[in-house]
Image (tube, rainbow, N blue to C red):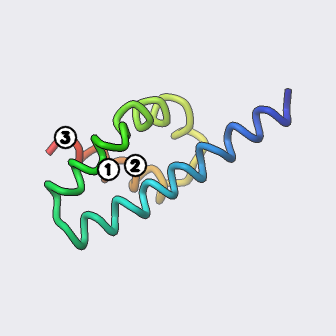
Amino acid sequence: MFFNLFLEKYYFYNTYNTYFSEMKIYFDFFGKNKARKRLKNLKFLEFLDYFWKTYTKKFKIQQISSLLFLKKLIKS
């Protein structure tokens, strides 16, 4: 039980970091519209909602601010 929970947290933490790094590069290089299109292609919205509900309380302020940046990017 504990090991499965650990794997799940580890998987989502790494997935989140990978997506955020990729989105930051897209945002800086291509601009907001292409970054938003890339997010939709990756079906990132569902992942972000799930991540937001499940994992934000357990992360540091820097990671939460990164997540808020992505939510703002999607909605704008």
Report helix, strand or loop for mark 2: helix
Residue at the spot of label 2: 67
Q: CA distance from mark 3 to mark 2?
A: 13 Å
Residue 12 occupies quadrant: top right
Report helix, strand or loop for mark 1: helix
Residue lying at 23% horizontally and 44% vertically, measured from the top left? 74
Residue lying at 25% horizontally and 64% vertically, measured from the top left? 27
On residue 31, the disc is none
Residue lying at 55% horizontally and 49% vertically, measured from the top left? 15
Circles 1, 2 touching at the beta carbon (< 8 Å)? yes
66 left or right of 9? left
Label 1: few (<14), some (14–19) or many (≥20) C-alpha neighbours in 10 Å:
many
- Residue 61 in percent (x, y) is at 48, 54
Q: What is the three-letter code of the residue carrying label 1?
A: Leu
Q: What is the three-letter code of the residue carrying label 2?
A: Leu
- Residue 23 in percent (x, y) is at 34, 59
Q: CA distance from mark 1 to mark 2?
A: 5 Å
- Residue 69 in percent (x, y) is at 31, 53
Report helix, strand or loop for mark 3: helix
On residue 70, the disc is 1
Q: Is residue 36 above or below residue 43?
A: below
Label 2: few (<14), some (14–19) or many (≥20) C-alpha neighbours in 10 Å:
some
Residue at the spot of label 3: 75
Dot 3 or dot 2: first in sequence order is 2
Q: Is residue 66 above or below residue 2?
A: below
Q: What is the three-letter code of the residue carrying label 3?
A: Lys
- Residue 17 in percent (x, y) is at 51, 57
